[in-house]
Amino acid sequence: MRSRTPSGMRLVNLLLSGWTGLVFLFLYLPIVLLVVYSFNASRLAIVWEGFTFRWYEQLWHEFTAHLADERRSALIESMGNSVIIAAATTGLSVLLGTAGGWLLHRYRFPALRTISTLIFIPMIIPEIIMGISLLIFFKTVEMELGFATVIISHVTFCFPFVLVAVQARLAGLDPSLEEAAMDLGATPLKAFWHVMVPYLLPAIISGALMSFTLSMDELIVTYFTRGPKSETLPIKVYGMAKVGLNPLLNTISTVFIVGTAMLVICAELLKGTARRSREPG
Amino acid sequence: MTPGTGQLPEIQGAQRRPGLRGWLLFAPLMLWLFAFVIAPTAIMFVYSFCQRDELGQVVFEFSLSNYTRVFDKTYLKIFTNSIQYAAITTVICLLVGYPVAYFIGRASEQIRNKLLMLVMIPFWTSFLIRTYAWMSILKAEGPLNGMLLYMQLIAAPLDILYTPAAVVIGLVYSYLPFMILPIYGSVEKLDNALIEAAFDLGAGPVSAFSHVIVPLTRPGIFAGVLLVFIPAIGMFAITDLMGGGRVPMIGNVIQNQFGQARDWPFGAALGMTMLLLFAACFALSMRKSDAA
Amino acid sequence: MKRIGGLIYLLAIAIVAFLVGCKKDEPAAPAPGAGSAKAPAAAAVGKELNLFAWSEYIPEDVITGFTKETGVKVNYETYASNEEMLSKLLAGGTKYDLIQPSEYVIEALVKQNKLEALDHAKLTNLKNIVADLRDMPHDPGLKYSVPWMVGFVGIVVNTDKVKDPVKGFKDVFQDKYKGRIVALNDNREIVAWAMMTHGIDVNQMTPENLEKVKPTVEKWIKLVKVFDSDSPKTAMMNGDVDIGVVWSGEGAILANTDKKYAFVIPEEGARQYIDNLAIPKGAPNAEGAHLFINYILRPEVSKLVSDKFPYTNPNSEARKLLTPEQLKNPASYPEIKSKQTFRDIGKAASDLDKMVTDLKAAAN
């Protein structure tokens, strides 16, 4: 194999990994600052005033009191709401976006260009217009504002991201691939599950990641479509900026980021052990 | 493929006309589009031809005046400004993001998804927290200037925050993942044999890249450009926070119409113009690639 | 694979149906009479109160205290600007019981008959409001609104960097401070400052007056480095600007962090803003809303708000409970020669927005 990788290619690989490292540094630079500032003694989280664990203690107290139902913590509640909304949004967007992308590839629908353009409307339309028009729509059909309306709105602007990723992945693929699998004796269900899903998986994962991220961070559409009980983290944070960003925000973000990173690594490790035990040697 | 049949250029092979089943499967997506995209957009379309009352409520009285106002030179200038920032952001994201997407797509299977997650995780904090973090990095007395001064690369603190450079940094930071992820999807399916064949035929890395890799990953590049450029046009929160709010973006102007200016119909007209502009560009780009 | 596709779609439809359904199942917010167990005196008080108010403006202790006493559950939905609130209210969001608009919005809402008249018989603590806030032009006699907190727009100065005395807007907007100024990112504010400097009433938003102040606004916009309404203190504390025109609440926070920050009420005039509680037309739980207003008018409750947010408390009895330090903060209880409040300017808002947008776009 070595002879197949020319030395020029190895140099390119080295450069690529170096560049990727630099870009990761860029992506994590503000996160590092955020983690550092979560130990900042200053109440306003703008100027460094010394090291403290105080915010972590306070977060823990708020968390336990919230769980024990003693004292409601708006911050923790909004964080929970955001995760619930983002998870539901991701699930629905993946279903809608994957199926849509695949069907548009599989069949020759009339007015395809019009349909494709329509799918992009939620991406181009300014958030405030989308927010207000959806609010007017929900009011017209008499839907009560709350989690459902927020999730529907989020899916509307998230699923195009999944669809675009899936379409890019499908580009150039022969639509009759599955039929070939079926000709070899697989049922349609098996053919889809064993041929299409694995093939589309990288696009589905990246689409899901984009949906989750967009939903976690959306402010304006959420503001208009939320009900009195569905405050999300971005809305809470935006409001807090007025009285000074509380260091608790840095703390809760740190906990969330480190928590998810740990989860990813643990899942990966578990998968690794499972694989090794299945394939001895 | 015959041009002008209205199908996407990338799609080849045995595409079929949808039968009843095809349409049934497609129905939920169409329903979703009708209910949550077309209906609300139609409401705004109607509003864009209306007038408003003192409180800012929409009065149904037909008029084209909102659209004639859109073509005022101030708003045209603001439109071009926003498109400029979006274009610069897209180009930088592509240049910075492509090698990363390529690296992740070519990495071993075990670490690919982990790397993708790592690209996204920073964005699971709130936008405002991230932006404030960037602002404290770039500020006059911030760590970046401190480091540059310490290394004696500069004599006086650089003025970065509240300049167009800061805005571009903020925009590139926010949109980079949306360039990396779709390109990754295209790179991941590249066939190693093709690249090796290019080398076997004597191509250097550069020509292998430009003649084999780029054409094969074009759908991913196209998707990435779309996902960055389009949302970036309407973005104004970053320009406000990192640019100091001095340069109005089209997003600001529209937001203001629904806020302080209390002129929803004009805001709707601006939004509809953006939409039409996009639709025209999109249709044009599709026709062009059809012809190619 | 068609079957699988169908399954996916069925699942998607089921989830949507579930989402829609579960929203409908929730009990409607107002259930008249049901909340009477804990508050027998008020039989018509609903179980829940939908409060739509500024974010970070009503301490959680106040809400918890109210719920403990009356058994009414408070749903606190927030907004970050009057205009945001107005947009959602006009588009017809949730049925709110209590909103918290500023004075000029109260006036606009009253004009359009969008507010319920208050029943003063139920507001036994209304007498605590200081006299000079009872007859403001936006709502004479407090027929529709009760003041919550009062603030000002003023000048904040980093005295380490700015040595010259600063008394008014004309001292701020000078060529020598170019690139060192922060200002509120609010088109009406900057125009109002220019009008005060010209000695024009800030509410006479006529085309002639706009034309008159245009050159001033044009010049000022070029001098400003940062426009920020949400957190102007950030640019100040970061050291990127040394002088600015900000909300008094922001000024008070700055003054509390460091002695070097001075808060000055501009001599040309102080723009006073009054945030109020009001009940929108058709509120399902107007009874509960009255109860809440009367609750926050209690001196000891109002003091809780002052402890958390350094604005001017309109409650004369509550002021007696404050510490001397609180009363001494110049950003909270300033001495003011001439006060100006914003009135509703109707459609002129759009002309003003156009002018400032033009000037900002041309400045770059």
Image (cartoon, rainbow, N blue to C red):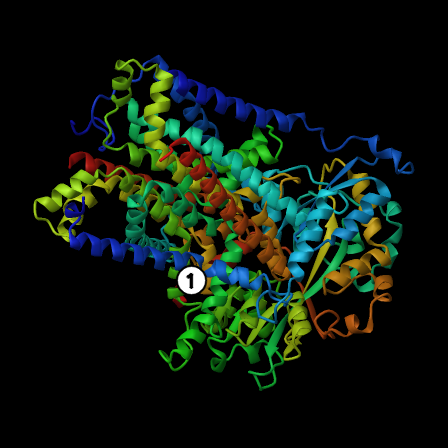
From the image, tell me which residue sits under label 1: B247
Toward which corner of the image does residue A146 lie, by quadrant? top right
In percent of width and height, residue C140 lies at 77, 55
Residue drawn at point x = 58 percent, y = 83 percent: C160
- Furthest toward the right, the residue is C41
**Residue type highlighted by circle 1:** Val
Q: Tell whether B292 sits left or right of A64.
A: left
Q: Chain of mark 1?
A: B
In percent of width and height, residue B119 lies at 41, 49
Quarter of the image with the N terminus of chain C is top left
Quarter of the image with the C terminus of chain C is bottom left
Residue drawn at point x = 29 percent, y = 23 percent: A106
B106 to B252, vertically: above or below: above
C81 to C155, vertically: above or below: above
Q: How many marks?
A: 1
Residue drawn at point x = 52 percent, y = 69 percent: C213
Task: Please name whichever residue, A109 or B154, is drawn nearer the observer in this view of the structure.
Answer: B154
- Furthest toward the bottom, the residue is C164
In percent of width and height, residue A234 lies at 56, 49
One can see residue B228 in this view: yes
Say what secondary structure mark 1 lies in.
loop
